[in-house]
Image (tube, grey):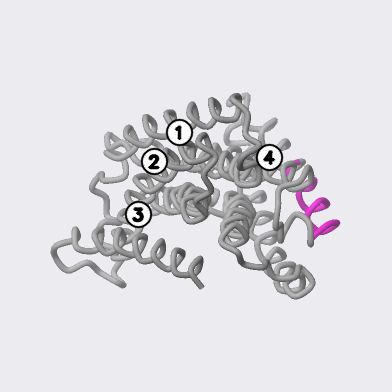
Amino acid sequence: MEQWLPRQPLILTPTIPLMWTVGWLCTMSAYIILGGQPPSPNQLQDSVLLGSAVILVMNIYNLILIYQRTEKYRNLSPYAPRALLLALILIISIVLAWGQPKVVLIPSYLNIWVMIFIVLNFLQALLGQFFALLERPQSRRKFASMYWPIVVLCSAGVMTPPNLELYNGWTLPFIIGDCILLVFFIVRSWQEIPRILVMVPANNSIIYELLIGINLATIISTVVSGVLFIVFNFNKTEISIVSACFALSPTINGISGLIIGAMQRYNNDYRYGHVKGHPQRYIYCGILLVIIFLILGLNLKKI
């Protein structure tokens, strides 16, 4: 069977459901807090179901790639049980998503079903990375972690919407919890920066360099907006643009981090969109894109 499908398990495919769910949820949370009205799920259901069907096919294909290597890794005890667990999680996610598409695929707020779906996507992403990285042995260069962005996305999806809804109803445990998470984010992101900036063939890609700039900028914006968010809420001051920035920054950071890690591990020649000298300029452009995005968010609030 391995001769029939000789490809290695895919890297990004198992993480797409998590990126979509958390990205949509945090974007809607930021949009609502800026005064916007979220779109009706009835208007988007058919399109989202069509997109989810494509993602489902990709995940089933990835599961086949994983199962065809069971015999190859029969001496690796976690392989077969984790492959079975991944299949079970995928089945449960499909039943939940297609059973309540308006609730879990197009969420405007966090509820118990959305939280369960995020946790399932989180486990699917972690297991998917185990199989994807197993056949991509580490070199002497330390690549960007594929697990850390998954943790960032899951934390953003579970913690951000309740924080934005609480406002002055905060209690001391929430403040302490957010402070601990923010300190952990600072420490872990600082450790991750050298891995993001490592020299790889992907450095020849303009998109890759832009993503590095976006990732670095969102680290800074997450820290700054997080500190301001905690201070303002502790003083019972409502600053919507800070809250929106705090909702979007870690989400963009996690998504960009996953794409960067995947591009580092795919040994493509990146002949299209080739960087021609001074790759730093594209990193600065990525940082500038984040700044422009935040300015547009401020103007949305004024409108």
Q: Nearer the viewer, mark 3 or mark 2?
A: 2
Q: Secondary structure at mark 3?
A: loop
Find numbered disc 4 in the image and state the secondary structure of the residue it sits on.
helix
Tell which circle, 1 or 3, labels the residue nearer the N-terminal end: 1
Question: Mark 4 is on which residue type?
Answer: Val
Residue topped by disc 4: 119
Indicate which disc, 4 or 1, sits on the residue closer to the N terminus: 4
Q: Is residue 154 left or right of residue 223?
A: right
Residue 187 left/right relative to 281: right
Circles 3 and 2 in contact, beta carbons < 8 Å: no
Kindly identify the amino acid type of the residue bearing the numbered disc 1: Leu
Could you tell which of marks 4 and 2 lies nearer the N-terminus?
4
Q: Local crowd at mark 1 within 10 Å, few (<14), some, or many (≥20)? A: some
Q: Residue at x 81, y 51 (%)?
A: 96
Determine the secondary structure under disc 1. helix
Q: Which residue corresponds to the image point at 57% horizontal and 39% vertical from the top-left? A: 155
Identify residue for label 3. 267
Q: Neighbour class for label 3 at 10 Å: few (<14), some, many (≥20)? A: few
At label 3, the amino acid type is Asn
Closer to the camera, 215 or 83? 215
Disc 4 vs disc 1: Cβ atoms closer than 8 Å? Answer: no
Read off the residue under disc 2. Answer: 223
